[in-house]
Amino acid sequence: MKRFQVPERLRSIFWKEFIQMRRDRATLRLMLITPVMQLVLFSYAIRTDVRNLPTVVFDQSQTAQSRALVDRFVATGNFKVSYHAASYDEAVMRIDRGRERAAIVVPPSYARDLKRGRGTAVQVLVDATDPTSSQSAIGAGLLVGQRENLAVLQARTGGRLIPSVDVRVRPLYNPALRNALFMVPGIIGALLSNMLIITTALGITREREAGTLEQLIVTPLNRTEIMLGKIGPYMLVGFVQLTMVLIVGSLLFHMPIRGSIPLIYLVSFVFIVANLGLGLFFSTVARTQAAAIQTSFFMLLPNIMLSGFMFPREAMPVVAKWLGLALPLTYFLQVLRAIVLKGVGLAEIWPQLLGLIAFAALFFLFSVQRFQKQLD
């Protein structure tokens, strides 16, 4: 009979947590609706490939050739002509005032120089106060220049120009270079981590402030059972959040899921346990709900900056890379992107999975050890 005592006690505390969660309708709606809203907002708002920069054109040539050149700049998708300036100073002034972010300056002798086979200079001014958008525009401008040079050389040789080096680039896994395919898996991990840590961090502190912690203390439940009872309902909420975000990401942003869905849920289970354990650890350190929320925000900024959620880890300094290795989100993003976009299996992701398992065991052990079955 004693073997069945622990499951029965766990079912009791699970049911208690579900009842408490059902009564707190505002928090329940927050946990279920907020991830979908943030997924939609972040996926549309966060763009590393900036397109359609407002561009002013100062065309001194005013010929069919110069207009064709401007059209080629627009065709890249990085430039959008919004104004035609009457002078060079006016073009620069509009960039200074922030009305446009780029300027295309065509010299008056552009068409004449092309016909005579002489070199000609076309200037592209880019507002580089935002390096991300300026790099895209600079790259597009250089590409247009290279294509124009190749077209001129082919015209002079009657189309018989054969390049000495033929470099062909084939993008794998994301041929269209869609930013959403990179961002949506990252948003899934960041939302799960932040939401679960914050909501779980309120678990014991809410009980302590409400006075119901005394009822848990007088029960025959041990510390491990209390912690398991606390994370059980939130684990279910985490799976619901994961399912909702995967469905929205697939339908709204056409994110392909090339790998195994059961493997995604297996890895997510370990990741969810790790974050729930970390949230419970924060709740045992803090004495109030406000302090628990403030402590849980300690993980928010590192999760965004160091995990590879928004910024590639390859470009980070060595110290930042080492700090990022202390975050479960770093490993989860590598695994989730590999499964979803590349379709890899367990054989390719087992090192990251072992890291997540270690985090889950470590955080849960810390939270159990920190929790004392007493009020003070």
Image: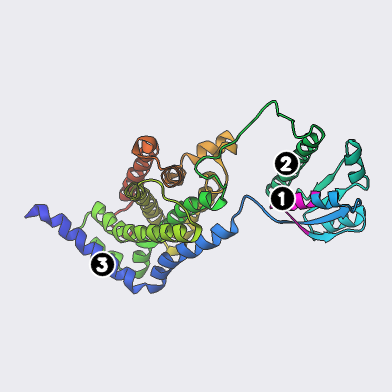
3 and 1 marks in contact (CB < 8 Å): no
According to the image, label 3 marks what residue? Answer: 16
Tell me the residue at 89%/45% (across/down): 111
Residue 374: % across, % down: 29, 58
Label 2 Cα neighbours within 10 Å, binned few <14 / some 14-19 / many ≥20: some
Residue 75 shown in magenta: yes
Q: Nearer the viewer, residue 283 or 59?
A: 59
In screen coordinates, is 302 left or right of 213?
A: right
* Residue 20 is covered by the magenta coloring: no
Q: Position of residue 28 (x, y in %)?
A: 38, 69
Q: Secondary structure at mark 2?
A: helix
Q: Is residue 279 left or right of residue 77?
A: left
Q: Which residues make up the magenta segment?
A: 69-81
Q: Nearer the viewer, mark 3 or mark 1?
A: 1
Q: Is residue 207 left or right of residue 161?
A: left
Query: Of the residues shown, which amino acid type is indicated by label 3?
Result: Lys
Left or right of residue 308, residue 215 in this image? left
In the rendered image, residue 328, in percent from the top left (x then y), is placed at 43, 45
Q: Which residue is mark 1?
A: 130
- Give the mark, 3 or 2, whose residue is nearer the N terminus: 3
Which numbered dot is residue 143?
2
Q: Quadrant of the N terminus?
A: bottom left
Identity, as a three-letter code, of the amino acid under mark 2: Leu
Report, in whole angstroms, how far the alpha carbon at label 3 lies from the one at label 1: 52 Å
Task: Give the total number of marks visible in the rendering.
Answer: 3
- The reply to whether the C-beta atoms of the residues labelled 1 and 2 are less than 8 Å apart is no
